[in-house]
Image (spheres, rainbow, N blue to C red):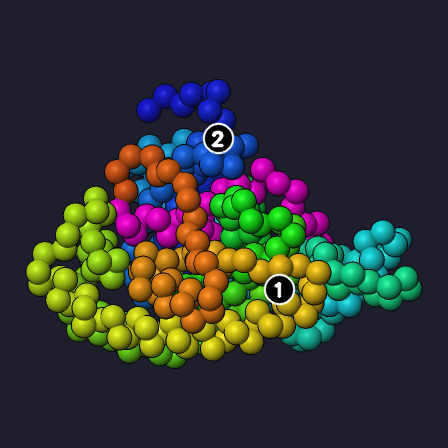
Amino acid sequence: MIPLPHLNPSPIGIDITKRGIHLAQAITPADPLSPVRTAFVPRAADATPQSDAQLVANLLDRRDFVSRRVVIAAPGDSAFSAVLDLPPRSSAAPVDQLAAIELARSHKLDPKDITVATWQLPLPTRAGEPAKHMAVALPSAAGERLVAAFESEGLFVEAIDARALAMARALTPHPDDEGCIIPILCADWHRASLTAVFQGEVFYERALETARFRALDAAVQATAIDSPAIIDEMLAGSRSDGSALEPTLAQLASSLTPLVISHAAELVDQLRLSLAYVAQLMPQAGLSRIELMGELACVPTLGQAIADALQLEVTLPDRAIVGSASITHRAALGPALGLSLLNSRTTPETAP
């Protein structure tokens, strides 16, 4: 394939979950509704950074992605975050270094051994009071291993980025967003999180419990279907092209509905508490919708159950996918897409 210079595509965003690796590349990053190239490859339970890098390199050799520049999500089992009271950025204080010291102390690490990104939260503060900052950290050794693995496969790692920041970039513009908090529920196959965004800035992040998901996961495994694409079509209730499921798949899908609703109820209980808290943090802001991202965003029953329980509209990322893509590929329109848009917006400063 010959790249078209005027398209100026983004780097390739790489979001690694327990289920697999999602890739996305915006064709024209400056366009908020740019079409997106996507891909998905399953990964083994014992996968390593090196095996992940090999999967990605092999996939890029077979697909029409442009360039080998990549932005990777910080590994969820290594990265950590906190909201800290620190001097305002307008002061002369070394905010990033102070954040690194505080995060390192709370995790019994040396500040020199972590890389930290910080940004001041868009919250009202009084004169003379500290400002609240979100800080995200990754042990430098974990980042170096990830970069070394991918660069050994001929890929150029432009950055390792926080998943919450990536999801904020991937938000689909909505006419009612002005002056509103936008909660992002990212529901993946083995994890869930809530990220709250106001005026383009992430100001709250929380991992959600997913104990009831295990029953759904066990029921899916009991079907003996091992193709993620077919599993996602079954949970979505239709084929990727919109056609009806085969009777056997439709019957299996119907049997899974109560488990999906149970998982939704589990999430709703936590969402109610978190949304009440973020409303207190940002009393001047409204709340009109929830953006649903992740591997379970393809399940209409999940989104509808959450919308009904919270009496809020649940929206999905809305981008055109280049070429034929399965329902599974739409999960890349969340974190992976946001990773690919890293250079299209201002990013937080980092402290080594």
What is the quadrant of the N terminus in the image? top left
**Amino acid type at image mark 1:** Tyr
Between marks 2 and 1, how big is the CA–CA gap?
Answer: 29 Å
Task: Residue 261: give x, y in percent of width and height.
Answer: 32, 73
Q: Nearer the viewer, residue 236 or 284?
A: 284
Q: Which residues are magenta?
A: 326-352
Number of other residues with Cα within 10 Å of mark 2, as a class: few under 14, some 14 to 19, many 20 or more: some
Residue drawn at point x = 45 percent, y = 34 percent: 34
| Quarter occupied by the C terminus | bottom right
The residue closer to the viewer here, 342 or 196, is 196
Taking the spot 65% from the left edge, 46% from the top edge, the residue there is 347
Residue at 88 percent across and 54 percent down: it is 91
Report which residue position mark 1 lands on: 204
Image location (x, y in percent) of residue 303: 38, 62
| Neighbourhood count class around disc 1 (C-alpha, 10 Å): few under 14, some 14–19, many 20 upward | many
Q: On the rendered structure, is 335 left or right of 100?
A: left
x, y percent for residue 321: 35, 38
Answer above or below: position of 300 versus 342: below
Q: In this figure, which residue is indicated by the disc labeled 2?
A: 28
Circle 2 SS class: loop
